[in-house]
Amino acid sequence: MKNEALKRIISSIIIIPLALFFIVKGSIFFIFFITFCFLIASYEWYILSKNRQYNLPGHLFLFISFYSAYLYREYLSQDAELFLFIILICVSTDIGGYIFGKLFKGPKLTKISPNKSYSGMFGGYLIAFISVSIFLYSDFYFQSLGKLNIMFNLPNVLFIFTVSTLSQSGDIIISYFKRLSKVKDTGKLIPGHGGILDRIDGMLFALPIAYLIFFYQNGFWIW
């Protein structure tokens, strides 16, 4: 268990700065980054769902999700602020779920994914809100990224809660398909984490909905 946690930490230290570089740079850099991730994720999904009825629908969903990420970053997210905001919610939700689930365990959340617990779900929400607070009100954010002017009013709290819920749901859904295929991880590309799908499962479900919310209700939670 300790070796697995160490691998996760080392991999995160390497991957996070690289991902941030491509996201913040945007343009051709971001296109290259998400194209690479899309191809790897598609391959992992193909292996995971080969000869099954949901193979093609899964590939279609991956395309829609990655295309939503592209639109969100390149057309809605000036200087990557909004995009990083969504990614932060998803990543912190995943971290909170993992830490609280390991520490407190307790009743299982669903049979679909037996490793998920109510304590992990609560931890995901808690760490997501804490991380957003630090992100929005830190000196680094104001000096380096600007100000999104997001306040913790009811619409914004509901939005963060929705994105966190979608992220956790994506994790559970991908876990369900892994159980059907009797595999632990979708791949072995990232030591300690598994495959690309293992790491972005929550984002795949959160980004398209976040894009639709912002696109159709511009002004509802940001401006």
Image: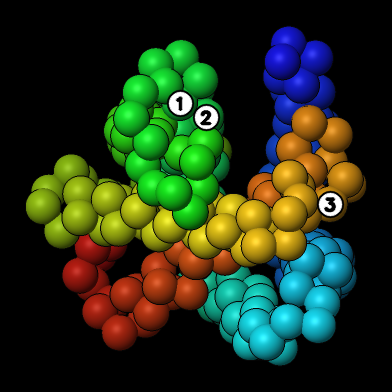
* Residue beneath the point at 75% across and 73% down: 49
Which badge, 3 or 1, is on the more N-terminal residue?
1
Q: Which residue is mark 1?
A: 101
| x and y percentages locating residue 84 in the rendered image | 53, 51
Image height of 63 relative to 219, above or below: below
Image height of 16 relative to 113, above or below: above
| x and y percentages locating residue 190 in the rendered image | 84, 41
Q: Amino acid at mark 2?
A: Tyr
Quarter in which the N terminus is drawn: top right
- Mark 3 Cα within 10 Å, few/some/many (few <14, many 20+)? many
Q: Amino acid at mark 3?
A: Gly
Write down the quadrant of residue 23 in the picture.
bottom right
* Residue beneath the point at 68% across and 57% down: 178
Picture disc at residue 98? 2
Image height of 14 relative to 89, above or below: above
Write down the quadrant of residue 37 in the picture.
bottom right
* Residue beneath the point at 88% across and 45% down: 188
The reply, left or right, for residue 119 in relation to residue 12 is: left
Which badge, 3 or 2, is on the more N-terminal residue?
2
Asked if the residue at tag 2 contacts the one at tag 3, i.e. Cβ–Cβ closer than 8 Å, the answer is no
Q: Amino acid at mark 1?
A: Gly
- Mark 2 Cα within 10 Å, few/some/many (few <14, many 20+)? many
Q: Which residue is mark 3?
A: 187
